[in-house]
């Protein structure tokens, strides 16, 4: 027994209303495929491991506490030793001094 | 591109310019992914007006190349190499061999029978 097309369409419309889907009897492309895709970003962005700096992060999390940073202490100590030997960084010049030093000679 | 690059180094693996570039691309892609998907939806939806779809196509093609997923390429975490990288171990084939023989990779054992 052949069922008329209009009746089937009515059924489909009712079905779509009940199950809250889109009524699309002609099967047009409506791009729902793109909306259903999952976002890939969160998985992609975690490929490389983050940089972990334990002491700095602890200091930031608990600013009132004190943490021992061996690397930083070593660095400061080596700078102190270098300064004692006269190998430290040069003293920062004032703006006037640096201008005087970089002044160009007048052209002939 | 410099406008996207992080000001502070935020990577804990082997670093060279290619790794930094790839990491930047990953972050930019994640940031713009929803925008790209929205434009792709408009382009794919044939029930929308043609003019709207064409403008979406233009907009998508004019987005910065760092926002494209095809720009992302897995690199070795131990040496920054771009070829012969195992997806599961994130390591190039030689680094994988060295680390596997040392026993640094759990569950990997040299075959012998």
Image: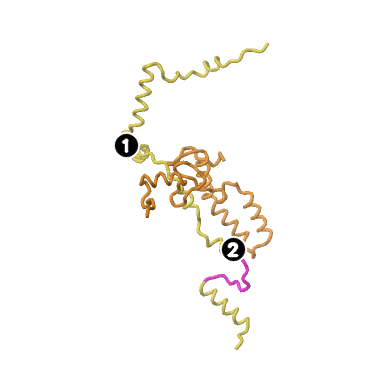
Chain colours: A yellow, B orange
Instruction: Specify the segment rendered in magenta.
Output: A20-31
Residue that protrudes farthest toward the front in the picture: B113
Picture coordinates of residue A52, whole percent (x, y): 39, 41
Q: Which mark is residue B21?
A: none
Question: Which residue is identified by label 2?
Answer: A31
- Image quadrant containing the C terminus of chain B: bottom left
Label 1 lies in what chain?
A
Q: Residue at x 47, y 53 (%)?
A: A43
Q: Is A70 colored magenta in this rendering? A: no
Please, is residue A22 above or below residue B112 in the view?
below
Q: Residue at x 65, y 55 (%)?
A: B57
Q: Is tag 2's residue or tag 1's residue first in the polypeptide sequence? A: 2
Residue A21 lies in the magenta stretch? yes
Q: Quadrant of residue B41?
A: bottom right
Residue drawn at (49%, 18%) of the image: A94
Could you say whether the residue bearing mark 1 is in a helix, strand or loop?
loop
Which numbered marker is on residue A64?
A: 1
Q: Residue furthest bottom?
A: A1
């Amino acid at each position: 027994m052949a069922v008329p097309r209009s009746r089937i369409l009515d059924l489909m419309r009712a079905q779509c209303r009940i199950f809250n889907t889109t009524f699309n009897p002609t099967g047009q492309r409506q791009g729902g495929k793109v909306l259903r895709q999952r976002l890939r970003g969160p998985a992609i962005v975690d490929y490389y491991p983050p940089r972990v700096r334990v002491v700095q992060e602890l200091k930031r999390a608990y600013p009132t506490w004190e943490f021992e940073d061996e690397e930083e202490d070593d660095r400061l100590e080596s700078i102190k030793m270098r300064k004692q030997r006269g190998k430290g960084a040069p003293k920062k010049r004032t703006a006037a001094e640096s201008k005087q030093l970089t002044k160009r000679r007048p052209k002939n | 591109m410099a406008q996207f690059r992080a000001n502070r180094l935020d990577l804990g693996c082997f670093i060279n310019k290619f790794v930094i570039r790839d990491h930047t691309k990953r972050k930019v892609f994640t940031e713009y992914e929803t925008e790209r998907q929205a434009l792709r939806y408009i382009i794919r939806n044939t029930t929308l007006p043609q003019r709207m779809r064409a403008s979406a196509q233009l907009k998508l093609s004019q987005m910065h190349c760092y926002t494209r997923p095809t720009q992302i390429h897995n690199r070795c975490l131990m040496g920054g190499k771009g070829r012969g990288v195992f997806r599961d171990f994130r390591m190039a084939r030689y680094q994988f061999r060295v680390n596997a023989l040392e026993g640094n990779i759990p569950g990997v054992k040299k075959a012998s029978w």
